[in-house]
Amino acid sequence: MIASLSGLISGAQLYWAVSILASVLLAFSVIGAFMGRGSDFNGPPQGGDKRNAARLFSLRTVISFFVGFGWTGVAAGRQSMPPGATAGIAAISGVIFLLLMFALMRMLISKGDE
């Protein structure tokens, strides 16, 4: 079963597919945010405290993970790195992108309170 699946898509194709799809989703998310549509949370949190409104695993942070994962995987694959190292570096980069987006959202929400 796995042998037949590995023949369908290569590692490079997987990274390209993830990076392009995640980049398009992130672009739609950002454009929607600028237009005032959609958010990562449903209304203000209980008690009106917006400092905790940014969540670590929101739609935008997860999309950011896949953007970092995909594009780093593409870049590492183009450097002819072994598949395990490529996946490891891509995963670490994805986590860094997730944390940066979380920090940015948290900072923007706290600035909106002032």
Image (cartoon, rainbow, N blue to C red):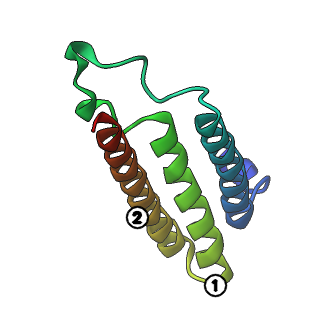
Tag 2, which secondary structure? helix
What's the CA distance linking mark 1 and mark 2?
Answer: 18 Å
Residue located at (44% from left, 67% from top): 88
- The 10 Å Cα crowd at callout 1, few under 14, some 14 to 19, many 20 or more, is few
Residue type (three-letter) at the residue carrying disc 1: Ser
**In the depicted structure, whether residue 78 falls above or below residue 36:** below
Q: State the mark number for residue 25.
A: none
Tag 1, which secondary structure? loop
Residue at mark 1? 80
Residue type (three-letter) at the residue carrying disc 2: Ile
Q: Foreground mark, 1 or 2?
A: 2
Residue at mark 2? 92
Residue located at (29% from left, 34% from top): 113
Q: In which quarter of the image is residue 71?
A: bottom right
- Give the percent coordinates (x, y) of residue 92: 40, 64
Task: Tell which residue pokes out farthest to the bottom in this image.
Answer: 79
Task: Tell which residue pokes out farthest to the right in this image.
Answer: 8
Residue nearest the viewer, comparing 70 with 103: 103
Which badge, 1 or 2, comes first in the chain's sequence? 1
64 on left or right of 19:
left
**In the depicted structure, whether residue 8 falls above or below residue 87:** above
Quadrant containing the C terminus in the rendered view = top left
Task: Tell which residue pokes out farthest to the top in this image.
Answer: 46
92 on left or right of 81:
left
- Give the percent coordinates (x, y) of residue 30: 61, 43
